[in-house]
């Protein structure tokens, strides 16, 4: 069983959809925080690459000679086990960037990165990033702010998220996808991927979805899931 969803006029990834804009985290991406002129410069210097669904951009243990910017599509970040199962920690969408920490710290990748659907990427080399940092203290400060926020979100998830019951964990992930979009909102993501994001089995996710539906926060339909009232879902999650 898969759960696919449409967010107003845009959609998150599913097997039969080509457009997607969803992300499963609240902290902003580093690239998105840069001034428009700098983003334009980076894009002009970056190398464009296309990936098919399921193709790996990099794997845990690879050396980091730069970072990625998502131009179109989505990318799953997580850990692939010995059986080939991808345990998803994050899903990122267009405008998001990742891999900066490994690049800046000059250490190896700690997560696997897999294309979710057809994906267009921009590769920014370490040399380009170093030139930008060296040439602007303002950019350096902004980078530190964003990286600190991302670290804080990771710590919050570690300390709080792990102790939540499954329905509230699921609610938190769904709300991250919703962001500030007008309701009703839908998310195009497989039920298995939801289970991996929350860290539970598919059966547990199905049960959690049923509970949220019973409370009137979501409605399940053939081929899609609708989040009817994100504000009410947020209040319930924090209660």
Image: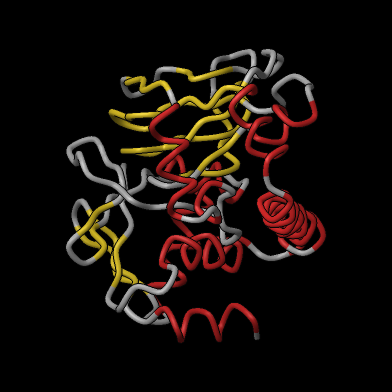
| Above or below, 90 relative to 156 | above
- The image quadrant where one finds the C terminus is bottom right
The number of numbered badges drawn on the structure is: 0
Residue shown at the point (41%, 67%) measured from the top left? 178
- Indicate the quadrant where residue 43 lies: top left
Give x and y (percent) for residue 45.
44, 27
Give 19 or 81, whichever is nearer the viewer: 19
Give 160 or 181, whichever is nearer the viewer: 181
229 sits left or right of 79 in the view: left
Farthest residue to the front: give it: 135
| Above or below, 16 relative to 22 | above
Give x and y (percent) for residue 64.
67, 19
The answer, for residue 202, to whether it is visible in the render is no
Give 48 or 80, whichever is nearer the viewer: 48
125 sits left or right of 9 in the view: right
Residue shown at the point (48%, 79%) measured from the top left? 233
Give x and y (percent) for residue 145.
72, 59
């Amino acid at each position: 069983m898969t759960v696919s969803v449409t967010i107003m006029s845009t959609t998150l990834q599913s097997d039969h959809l080509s457009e997607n804009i969803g992300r499963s985290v609240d902290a902003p991406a580093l690239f998105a925080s840069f001034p428009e002129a700098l983003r334009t410069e980076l894009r002009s210097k970056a190398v464009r690459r296309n990936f098919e669904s399921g193709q790996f951009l990099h794997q845990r243990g690879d050396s980091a000679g730069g970072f990625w910017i998502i131009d179109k599509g989505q990318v799953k970040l997580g850990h692939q086990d010995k059986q080939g199962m991808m345990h998803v920690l994050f899903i990122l969408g267009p405008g998001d960037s990742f891999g900066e920490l490994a690049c800046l710290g000059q250490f190896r990748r700690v997560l696997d990165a897999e294309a979710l659907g057809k994906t267009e990427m921009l590769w920014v080399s370490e040399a380009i990033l170093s030139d930008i940092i060296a040439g602007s203290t303002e950019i350096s400060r902004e980078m530190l702010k964003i990286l600190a926020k991302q670290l804080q979100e990771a710590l919050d998830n570690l300390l709080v998220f792990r102790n939540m019951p499954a329905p509230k964990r699921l609610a938190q992930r769904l709300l991250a996808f919703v962001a500030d979009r007008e309701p009703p909102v839908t998310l195009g993501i497989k039920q298995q991927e939801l289970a991996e994001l929350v860290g539970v089995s598919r059966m547990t996710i199905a049960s959690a979805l049923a509970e949220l539906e019973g409370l009137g926060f979501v409605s399940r339909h053939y081929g899609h899931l609708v989040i009817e009232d994100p504000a009410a879902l947020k209040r319930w999650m924090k209660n």
